[in-house]
Image (tube, helix red, strand yellow):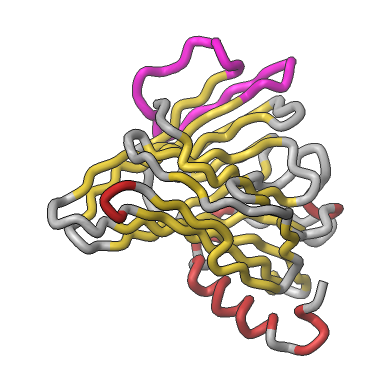
Amino acid sequence: MRGLVLGCYLLFCAALVRAEDSPGALRWFADWLAPEGANFQVVIEFSDLKLEPKESREQHLLPSPRIASPAAEWTGSKGRGARSEMCCVVWPMGLNDLTLGAVRLKLTNPADIPMHTTLSVRIVPRGELHALSFEKHSFLSEGRLILISDTPSRGAILAESPFAPRPLSPQDSAHVESAKGECRGEMLFDLTMAPGQTQALGFIVPLRLPKGAEPALDFYRELTVDQLFTEAQKQSGAGDRSKP
């Protein structure tokens, strides 16, 4: 699936740097977002919407706990638009804490007729990505969860390199490996919005984990993106803890 890039280059989680060694902060500029140390990027595209990101003149750093709302905005013809919000938050896990990132992507249909589009969430190497898996609407690299969607997808298409043969239709689960570190994949969402409707999709990314700990997918499924934003709002108002 190819289309005009909505922008929002989301760089999530790191395989070059273990999650417990990551500083747990997000950096973004105009149409991209990157956790420190990421070795891949997540590119969000809409198949047929011509949306242009608003310009930004400098990079921004989002430490934990903090919220950026909006983090980025896009505008298009007929009043169509999109915006992203993101947060970093400390979340308890047993006797330990971990740092999570969350992104909300909102698309609005201001027209008086329904709007149909396909959202593609693509994983692209930024450095070497030797293994990539997809299952239960989540991406994993070398057994570690790197991107969890809170909205059911149509499935994903994975490939071991840019020009490698790939399935023609999305799969519910898949795995690829590449000695050259060129693994990539895309998760697809079919969206239909009524006139005036705004639809939101959320994603969770583990940023900093307790040493030796690797939460299972069920741990993240018990969370919601809205919960993480609410907690980040509380924590960011707690004095010096919210400061970089």
Which residue is found at the position 58% from the left and 61% from the top? 71
Which residue is found at the position 46% from the left and 56% from the top? 105
Q: Left or right: where does residue 24 sit relative to residue 48?
A: right
Stretch in magenta: 160-183
Q: Please state the horizontal and vertical placement of residue 177, each as a whole percent of the image.
A: 64, 21
Looking at the image, is 198 positioned above or below residue 76?
Answer: below
Residue 54 showing in the rendered view:
yes
Principal secondary structure, stretch drawn in magenta: loop
Q: Quadrant of the C terminus?
A: bottom right
Q: Please state the horizontal and vertical placement of residue 106, each as a whole percent of the image.
A: 41, 59
Tell me, yes or no, whether the highlighted magenta stretch contains residue 175: yes
**Residue projecting furthest to the left:** 113
Tell me, yes or no, whether the highlighted magenta stretch contains residue 152: no
Between 21 and 222, the residue placed more toward the observer is 21
Between 5 and 89, the residue placed more toward the observer is 5
Q: Residue 142's quadrant in the figure?
A: top right
Q: Residue 112's quadrant in the figure?
A: bottom left
Q: Left or right: where does residue 117 sit relative to residue 163?
A: left
Q: How many marks?
A: 0
Which residue is found at the position 61% from the left and 80% from the top? 233
Q: Residue 124's quadrant in the figure?
A: top right
Q: Left or right: where does residue 110 sit relative to residue 15?
A: left
Looking at the image, is 3 positioned above or below residue 44?
Answer: above
Q: Please state the horizontal and vertical placement of residue 127, each as a whole percent of the image.
A: 76, 29
Q: Please state the horizontal and vertical placement of residue 159, each as a whole percent of the image.
A: 54, 20
Which residue is found at the position 45% from the left and 38% from the top? 45
Residue 202 showing in the rendered view:
no
